[in-house]
Image (cartoon, rainbow, N blue to C red):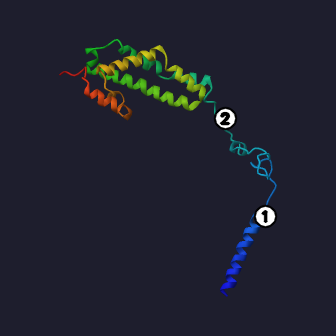
Amino acid sequence: MGAIRISLALGVIMAAMLFAGEHKRILGPRDPIAADGSFKAGRALTISESFPSSKPAAPDLDDPGKFEERFSRSSVERNRGAILDLAGLLGPALCEPDRHQQLIVAVQNYYGTKRYLDAEFHFRGPRASQFIDEAWTTPKDRQIEAFVRQLLEKGYLRAREIWPRDRSFLLDVFAQDLSPNACSRS
């Protein structure tokens, strides 16, 4: 009795394996792969071709007209100007609490805008990436970089004041803690 059950079960399994794949159909041009396994039957339709949408197509993000307009509408020039207005002040004038806070906010806004636009434009595509890389290499940007570097080196600013959440400046912060603070009263 047990042998009959086992042989019957094996027979059902063998039949299922042999006849399961027998229902073959001819693939049409809308199918991604031809019957012979090649890609000759035609290309697969995309979701938007299979189910057309009434929405207009998305704009090309890497179009120079679009990203140049986006850059010109940003606050880049205002942020550059805010730092360059303070660039002439070096010494005790930068140690006044209001002026010092104004400087920190100006530097944070400039670098925040720079990081945000870098990320956005590198996402847009190769032409936008090249554009933004060139846009941040103006003489004003080089002057700002030199000014901020000078402020950090002389101790008028601390890296943790400018980038409080960025841990990549941890070594700079440690090194600055060993250097004198130009604005300290002691």
Which numbered marker is on residue 57? 2
Crowd tier of the residue under label 2, counting other residues whose Cα lies within 10 Å: few below 14, some 14–19, many 20 or above: few
In the image, 121 versus 7, the foreground residue is: 7
Q: Residues within 10 Å of mark 1 (few under 14, many from 20)?
A: few
Residue at x 41% of width, y 19% of height: 145
Q: Which residue is mark 1?
A: 22
User: Which of the two discs, 2 and 1, labels the residue nearer the N terminus?
Assistant: 1
Left or right: 145 with respect to 179? right
Quadrant assignment for the C terminus:
top left
Spot the residue most to the top. Answer: 88
Q: Most extreme residue toward the right, as rendered? A: 26
Query: Would you place residue 59 above or below residue 139 in this image?
Result: below
Instruction: Report x, y in % for residue 122.
Output: 54, 30
Closest to the observer, 28 or 39? 39
Residue 94 shows up from this direction: yes
Q: Reply above or below: 145 against 166.
A: above
Q: Quadrant of residue 171?
A: top left
